[in-house]
Each structure stands twice: as C-alpha cells, then as structure tokens.
Image (cartoon, rainbow, N blue to C red):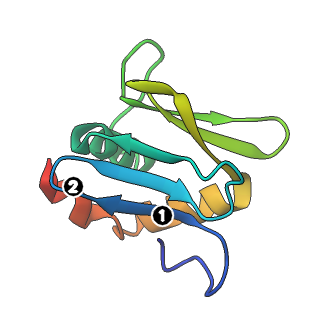
C-alpha cells in the first residue's frame, strides 16, 4: 500500500511470495486477488514511472483498463478472468506511490 493512501482508506495493495506478486484492492466488492509474475509487475512499474513505453500490441503481462465510469480494472494476461477493480482516485494514489519508488523493493525479485 502506498504511503499516499490515508490511514483507514481503501487502497491498492501489493504483496509478494517467492514466485508471485499479488495485487488487490481493499474496497473491491469481488475480493479479487490478481496474481502475476514479478517480471510482469516490474514492466507495469517501469511503464507507470515512464521508464518504459507501453505500446499497443506489446504484451506487458498486466492490463489496466480505465473505464468511463471512473473505474479502473487491473488484469493479468495469464488470468484474464480475474480483475481487481478500483476507482480512479485510488489508482492515482497507487501510481503516485509507484513513481515515488514505494514498490521498488518488489522489483528486486525479478
């Protein structure tokens, strides 16, 4: 969870095991947990930091869909049926944390 997320607020959470990165959102009514590879998470982080360009047709492993209704859905290419749902303000908080380097310790696993 990013330090930009206020205490007691719902936020995008990231956790790791030896071989996977898990992403969830505390307010997601489905309770979905997205499991992805460290490499796919690293690509997402690099793209959000602007260090790597994400282009159409280039697989990133994680797809982020910004809906017109203020929703954001995060899916892994390997498990397209599982999507973590958040809203735009919570996603923006996560992105601020990514850009501040708050999730870089997960990249060491790649």
36 relative position to 67: left or right:
left
Where in the figure is residue 61, as x and y percent of width and height?
A: 36, 29
Label 2, secondary structure: give it: helix
- Which residue is found at the position 53% from the left and 34% from the top? 82
- In the displayed structure, 78 sits above or below 69; it is above
Q: How many marks?
A: 2
In the drawing, what numbered circle is on residue 91? Answer: none
Q: Quadrant of residue 43?
A: top left
54 relative position to 80: left or right:
left
Q: Marks 2 and 1: which is nearer the front? A: 1
Check the image and name the residue furthest to the right.
69
- Which residue is found at the position 51% from the left and 55% from the top? 24
The residue that disc 2 covers is: 107
Mark 1 and mark 2 in contact (Cβ < 8 Å)?
A: no
Q: Earlier in the sequence, mark 2 or mark 1?
A: 1
Where in the figure is residue 89, as x and y percent of width and height?
A: 71, 61
- Which residue is found at the position 37% from the left and 17% from the top? 58
Q: CA distance from mark 2 to mark 1?
A: 15 Å
- Which residue is found at the position 55% from the left and 77% from the top? 4
99 relative position to 51: left or right:
right
Check the image and name the residue furthest to the top.
57
- In the displayed structure, 81 sits above or below 6; it is above
């Amino acid at each position: 969870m990013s330090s930009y997320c206020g205490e007691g607020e719902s936020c995008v959470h990231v956790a790791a095991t030896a071989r996977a990165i898990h992403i969830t959102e505390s307010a997601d009514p489905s309770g979905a947990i997205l499991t992805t590879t460290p490499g796919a998470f690293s690509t997402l982080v690099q793209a959000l930091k602007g260090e790597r360009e994400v282009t159409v047709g280039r697989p990133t492993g994680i797809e982020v869909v910004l809906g017109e209704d203020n929703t954001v859905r995060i899916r892994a290419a390997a498990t397209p049926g599982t999507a973590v749902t958040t809203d735009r303000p919570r996603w923006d908080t996560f992105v601020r944390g990514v850009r501040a380097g708050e999730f870089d310790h997960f990249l060491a696993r790649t």
